[in-house]
Image (cartoon, coloured by chain):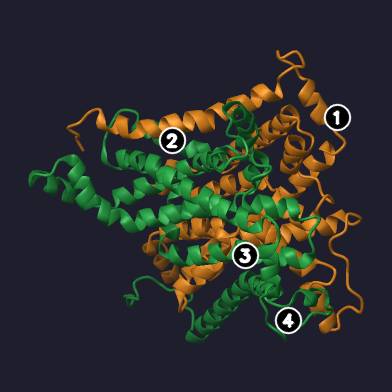
Amino acid sequence: MTTTTNEVPLPRSRSGRERLVGRGLTYLAATLLALFILVPIYLIAVSAFTPRDSAFDFPRSVIPTELSTDTILFFLNASGVIDAFWRSVIVALITLALSLLIGAPAGYAIARYAFRGRNSYRLVILATRAFPIVILAIPLAVTYRLWGIDDTVIGVALMHTALALPFTILITSSVFISVPRELEEAAQTLGCNPLQAFLRISMPLALPGLAAAAIFTWVLSWNDVFAAVILTLREPTLPAKILSALTQSPIYFQFAAGFVMLVPSLVVIFFIRKYLLGLWGRVVK
Amino acid sequence: MTARLGWAPYALLLPSAIFLAVFFAAPMVQAFALAFEGPDGGFGLSNVERMFGDSSFRSALLTTLALVVLVIPIQFALAMSMALVINAKLKGQGMWLYVYALPLGISELAAGIVWVSIFTQSGWLNSILIGLGITDAPITWQSAETPWLLIGCVVIAEAWRATSIIMIILVAGLQSIPREFLEAADVYGATNWQKIRRVILPMLRPSLQVALILRTILAFQVFATVIALAGSGLDVLAGEAQRWATDIDNDNVAAAYAGLILLLSLFSTVLFLVLLPTREEHQA
């Protein structure tokens, strides 16, 4: 803070004590908000890591008396769960690969070239967000039956790629904008062709941002339940499997399922925490 | 910015354009074709009429609207509080941001189940209420007999799950407010509340608008949280679309539901664009 030159009359300057109280209240608000997020995560973890029978104890003790993997193992060994788990992993990986393969070049073009139609393309990509994804799954299910890829991993992955692609394009373009163009030009004057300049200079610099984009795509696919329920029947992904098992399964099955679905998200958000503002903040522009 | 290869950007864009045309634009058009397909294969309103006449239609529409109207204000109040806390530069700023952003990666279904463990009859909430001596007998939160309690459960679960995205957009918006504006307000002795009302909120308008539009579109599609918490106790539009597509196996009526969700989303987008105009001179 600069000291004022008393030319401007200060109507009311706040005392140190007031500031301290304000600071304390801010910490209190911060803590309460954090508890609202964290306590439910703690409670589902306790639900998942206590023995199956304790789901019927009442009232339940918030501090677990006995930890066990009984509930989690029961869930993982339930018929079809492991298959669905791997299917989800494969769908997410295909989605990740496809959306980067198709989206990153587009993102690069928008970031690096001034060309006719650049802004309109950006606008079209932005506008895709105004369309609810729910609407895609039903007509795609009809199309997939014609193509013979209904109820397949690849069908779900293609639909997830359609959801992720606008994201990937916007994120990768902002990543490439942040990599100085001059470096690439310098490489070209030193004898690289544009492709080499990209592979040797821009690509390595953009890698952390691209990894964040990839991880985000992965989560998007891992979490989708609506499209998966519509597009699969006998070959469900994990969320689709859990959703259809929900009504006939014991409550401890649900607790373990909720926890298993939740864990990857916690880890992923941890790894991309630095990029969160960049990933989402830019949607305003 | 001159490129030597004039065709290069188009070649780079082409795969994404083709992909989006096949897997995004075509299904959008096809959804309406399915919804307005008559019994003889031509144009007809029979599917739409069937949707309107469906016994769950009214409750699905009303519940979805109720959820949107209840969840959005709560989420914005929470997200704004979180964003202001982040912006206050407390110790461990990164940790607070991480904690508030955690639900960003949590799926609708997982979030629904997390709150089932809390609201179920022998769940955490009743355990805590009895432990504290607030009630003697467990309260039934999730019953189709008390739809408003069920809606309350879903609202809380959705507020928990989907506030992060708004928070992130608002934090990014707050960081783009020039420091001088707030310092000037400080110099003139503005209280925190005055700073929020007179400086922060007006400057945050573009971010608020984007967050409102995004979040409302997502709220109209609420699905798995409702299924997890309410089962068949509450009908919502996306749930009906899914029921018609998979259980009843009628893609036409399902597409009509999906089309209705699309129309509601577009309508709300236009509404927010009109109600919260962001004039260019505000940013200048």
Asked whether the residues under the numbered discs 4 and 3 touch, taking CB atoms below 8 Å apart as contact, a structural biologist would say no
Q: Please give the name of the residue rendered at 89% of the width and 73% of the height, measured from the top-left corner.
A: B138
Q: Which residue is mark 1?
A: B53
Please determine whether, in this image, residue B129 is positioned above or below residue B64.
below
Asked whether the residues under the numbered discs 2 and 4 touch, taking CB atoms below 8 Å apart as contact, a structural biologist would say no
Q: Nearer the viewer, mark 2 or mark 4?
A: 4
- Amino acid type for the residue under numbered disc 2: Leu
Q: Please give the name of the residue rendered at 78% of the width and 38% of the height, measured from the top-left corner.
A: B247
Answer with the quarter of the image where residue B130 lies.
bottom right
Disc 1/disc 4 C-alpha distance (Å): 47 Å
**Residue B4 shown left or right of residue A3 in the figure:** left
Pick whichever, A152 or A40, lies toward us.
A152
Estimate the x, y position of residue A283 in percent, counting from the top left: 46, 48
Disc 1/disc 3 C-alpha distance (Å): 40 Å
Q: Residues within 10 Å of mark 3 (few under 14, many from 20)?
A: some
Q: Which residue is mark 3?
A: A260
Disc 4/disc 3 C-alpha distance (Å): 20 Å
- Amino acid type for the residue under numbered disc 1: Gly
Co-location on one chain, circles 2 and 1: no
Chain B colour as displayed: orange
Judging from the image, mark 2 belongs to the subunit labelled A
Estimate the x, y position of residue B188 in percent, counting from the top left: 44, 69
Disc 2/disc 4 C-alpha distance (Å): 50 Å
Residue B227 in sight in this render: yes
Disc 2/disc 1 C-alpha distance (Å): 38 Å
Tell me, for residue A123, which label it has, or none.
2
Q: Residues within 10 Å of mark 1 (few under 14, many from 20)?
A: few
Q: Which chain is green?
A: A
